[in-house]
Image (cartoon, rainbow, N blue to C red):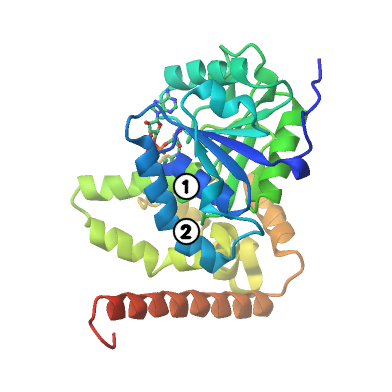
């Protein structure tokens, strides 16, 4: 039976954050900065003190980004019990430790204490909601809302339901996160690691291969990313970046030119077969992303944005050096 949401995403006033560590605390800071009332709960004895100090340290960044009207650290309440934390919530963000048994029990407990029609988003990094919602009496309102660290700065949230989630809950959560200032990807199907983690875990696996084999150091790997592809990925992503690697021939030329190197020993991962279908799909989807922008236009955009990021990083490094009393950097 399709349930009715207790409130519209636009009318949300109070968000409950369950689990207040690195990610739960980051969510608390984000929601406070966007002007919501936040009620947090975490079973650790020192949780409140740690949470308030995380919010204090995040606040200057939130002020620089621009606080929503009415945003205040005073809008945070730490509840003594889970049931009290969720009783008046219009939305719940679960950020407990990444253990399947714990998540399944906790989501069932949240569901049992929560008013009908209130959606719950889980911060899980990789479990599917189908695995986690098995113990809940009403699994229809449980969805994944996977953030990136820190949630008060990195915009992306990946939203996906499980087998027993209902579409209204997925749509409701997607709209709520969007209104709360996030960049939302609503996924049509469950995928281990979602999209962002699947991509970065591939890079991570290669980094670990190289360190394990003594082929590269951690410093070299980090430098290779921050001074190389990482700069471009901040605005073009890996597909548009490689579209430009094909010059005027774009993605089609790049795949025809460099496709065979997928079989070269550059990676310890199994490379997919570069079938005609895969080639054509890549070209077609890249064309959609490029959306008619010319190579010259994309290059100009790439160069301006890359310089902007480099200047911004330099400015921050100068500020940090000055704060350390090192004068002109
Ligand atoms: N650390 C990261 O970079 C990211 C983590 N995540 C996800 O966020 C979730 C939380 O991870 P972190 O914040 O990194 O872990 P964390 O260890 O920093 O925080 C977990 C918090 O949950 C509390 N907790 C323990 N048992 C609990 C229970 N039964 N109910 C409620 N809270 C409980 C702990 O006291 C702790 O404060 C995980 O699902 C993780 O996969 C998602 C994106 C990034
Ligand atoms: C390390 N991690 C798998 C928990 C990372 C994430 O899930 C997302 C992120 O912040 O990179």
Q: Splitting the image into 4 quarters, where does residue 67 fall?
A: bottom right
Q: In front here: 86 or 232?
A: 86
Q: Is mark 1 within 8 Å of ligand 1?
A: yes
User: Is residue 268 something one can see in this rendering?
Assistant: no
Residue at mark 1 = 26
Query: Residue at position x 39%, y 79% from top?
Result: 314
Rendered-image quarter of ligand 2: top left
Return the residue at label 2. Answer: 59
Foreground residue, 37 or 112? Answer: 37
Q: Position of residue 43 (x, y in %)?
A: 39, 26
Frontmost residue, 197 versus 241? 197
Residue at point 58%, 25% (across, down): 129
Q: Nearer the viewer, residue 58 or 164?
A: 58
Of tags 1 and 2, which is closer to the observer?
Answer: 2
For residue 167, side relative to residue 46 (left or right) = right
| Dot 1: element | helix
User: Residue 251's quadrant in the figure?
Assistant: bottom right
Q: Is residue 53 left or right of residue 156?
A: left
Residue at the (41%, 74%) spot, across then down? 313
Q: Is residue 48 left or right of residue 260?
A: left
**Neighbourhood count class around disc 2 (C-alpha, 10 Å): few under 14, some 14–19, many 20 upward:** many
| Vertical relation: 71 (above or below) 296 | above
Residue 60 location, x and y as percent?
46, 64
Q: Position of residue 88 (x, y in %)?
A: 65, 29
Q: How many marks?
A: 2
Quadrant position of the N terminus in the picture? top right
């Amino acid at each position: 039976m399709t349930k009715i949401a207790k409130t519209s995403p636009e009318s949300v006033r109070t968000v409950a954050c369950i689990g207040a560590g690195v990610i739960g605390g980051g969510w608390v800071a984000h929601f406070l900065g966007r002007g919501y009332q936040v009620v947090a709960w975490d079973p650790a004895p020192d949780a409140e003190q740690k949470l308030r100090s995380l919010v204090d340290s995040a606040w200057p960044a939130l002020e620089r980004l621009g606080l929503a009207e009415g945003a205040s650290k005073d809008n945070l309440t730490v509840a003594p019990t889970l049931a009290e934390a969720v009783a008046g919530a219009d939305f719940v963000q679960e950020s407990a430790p990444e253990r399947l048994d714990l998540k399944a029990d906790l989501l069932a407990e949240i569901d049992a204490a929560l008013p009908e029609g209130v959606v719950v988003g889980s911060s899980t990094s990789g479990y599917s909601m189908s695995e986690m919602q098995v113990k809940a009496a009403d699994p229809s309102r449980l969805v994944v809302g996977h953030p990136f660290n820190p949630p008060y700065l990195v915009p992306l949230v990946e939203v996906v339901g499980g087998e027993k989630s209902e579409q209204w809950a997925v749509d409701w959560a997607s709209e709520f996160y969007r209104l709360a200032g996030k960049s939302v990807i609503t996924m049509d199907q469950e995928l281990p690691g979602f999209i962002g983690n699947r991509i970065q875990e591939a890079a991570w696996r290669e980094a670990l291969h190289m360190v394990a084999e003594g082929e590269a150091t951690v410093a070299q790997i980090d430098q290779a990313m921050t001074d190389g592809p990482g700069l471009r990925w901040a605005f073009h992503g890996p597909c548009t970046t490689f579209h430009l690697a094909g010059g005027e021939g774009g993605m089609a030329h790049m795949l025809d030119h460099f496709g065979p190197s997928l079989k070269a020993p550059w990676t310890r991962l199994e490379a997919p077969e570069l079938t005609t279908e895969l080639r054509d799909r890549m070209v077609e989807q890249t064309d959609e992303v490029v959306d008619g922008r010319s190579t010259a236009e994309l290059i100009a955009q790439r160069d301006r944005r890359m310089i902007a990021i480099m200047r911004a990083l330099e400015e921050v490094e100068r500020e940090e050096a000055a704060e350390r009393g090192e004068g002109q950097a």
